[in-house]
Amino acid sequence: MEALLSIPMLSIFLVPIMSSYSTSLNLLFFYLTWSTLVLSHSRLRVELFGTIAVRLLFYALPSIIFFLFDILTPSAAILIKAQGATGLPGGRKRRRIRAKELKIAAWGLFNLCLGIAVQGVLETVLVRTLGKRSALKVSLKLPMPFEICKGLTMAMLGREVSLLKFPDYIAVFLTYVLHRYALHSRWSPMLARWHRSWYHSLPAPFPLTAHYDHPIPYLLTKFIPTYAPAIIFRFHMLTYLLYLLFISIEETFAYSGYTVMPTSLFLGGIARRTDMHLLMGARGNFGPWGMMDWIFGTVLRDSRSDSSSSDESDEQQDMRRAYEASKRKVQAGPSTKNKRR
Ligand SMILES: [Zn+2]
């Protein structure tokens, strides 16, 4: 329990270290806390409690608050929802918590725990059963700033780019490749069916749906792309926590459906791309950053911003019509909504 409480304290110390000039004292203080933590707990406990603390503070808690805000005050939430009522849990304005939305939220949280459990099992098998070194580096030595920057850049790219050519590593299928070629492919009908009937049954993303999917597609397209780069580059535990913090914030906002974001260009862009993947029936936007979609020509733009454009192609017009039709269906009421499935 102390480990769980100590990790959030570490992240609090990280902020002054980065922003203040009196880093020497802060660094010493931080190093003492870190060494106490590493010396008094097993490496596995430090890794798991650190992961739980970051996920809880930067994904689960804010997402639960956003989810309750959407459910309890739909009239206020709708004002900042990019897709209007479609972006509310349940797809329309209603001031009542339905079992279905609670079930979606519970599955989302269950999947999050499942990912952490799989991480724990992997580390235990690696260290205790196979006698190998742990997948993540938990050492007394703090990572150098350059090491952190290099690791984060590679990992962030790695989430979206397949690193098949990377020497000494088994092929890694990451977000774009897995999402497009495993979850939306006729070669894997079972996975495609699960992903369609779970995640794609949502009218639009809403808070807590970042981790909502059938557990198998979830592990494939969420857990693996997040954890694999950290293992490949054997991150220092602190680099990993910082990496996970960025991902958690990204997921919290990308799936919120809100137009108000800490960085509207970056997070707002990811959020709208995530919306369009669902609203356009998975015709594109398979990666979070849009880089791979741009390379492979699967970019879907927000139809609302294109509606006035006269030079859009036939395909874009089709997509826009599909998007507008899906909105009309949802707004028409529950009887037509059920037919959409
Ligand atoms: Zn999909």
Image (tube, helix red, strand yellow):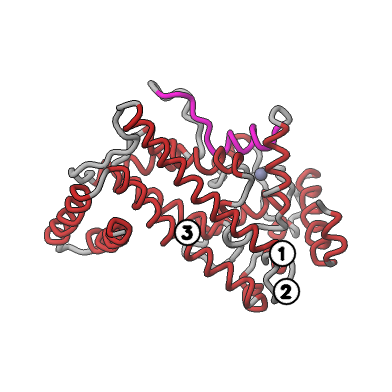
How packed mark 3 is, by other alpha carbons closer than 10 Å (few <14, some 14-19, many 20 or more), is many
In the image, taking residue 192 as reference, residue 328 lies left or right, namely right
- The image position of residue 210, as x and y in percent, is 57, 53
- The image position of residue 324, as x and y in percent, is 79, 58
The answer to the question of whether label 1 and label 2 lie on touching residues, with beta carbons closer than 8 A, is yes
In the rendered view of the protein, which quadrant contains the N terminus? bottom left
Q: Check disc 1 and give the amino acid type.
A: Gly
Q: Earlier in the sequence, mark 3 or mark 2?
A: 3
Q: Which mark is residue 125?
A: none
Location of residue 289 with respect to 22 vertically, above or below: above
327 is within the stretch colored magenta:
no
At x 13% / y 56%, what residue is drawn? 28
Q: Check disc 2 and give the amino acid type.
A: Arg
Residue nearer the viewer, 163 or 340? 340
In the image, taking residue 241 as reference, residue 72 lies left or right, namely right
CA gap between label 1 and label 2 equals 8 Å
How packed mark 1 is, by other alpha carbons closer than 10 Å (few <14, some 14-19, many 20 or more), is many
Query: Which residue does the numbered mark 2 point to in the structure image?
Result: 94
Residue nearer the viewer, 8 or 309? 8
Tell whether circle 1 marks a residue whose Cβ is less than 8 angstroms from ligand 1: no
Residues rendered magenta in the picture? 169-185
Query: Which residue does the numbered mark 1 point to in the structure image?
Result: 90
CA gap between label 3 and label 1 equals 21 Å
- The image position of residue 113, as x and y in percent, is 49, 50
Query: Which residue does the numbered mark 3 point to in the structure image?
Result: 59
175 is within the stretch colored magenta:
yes
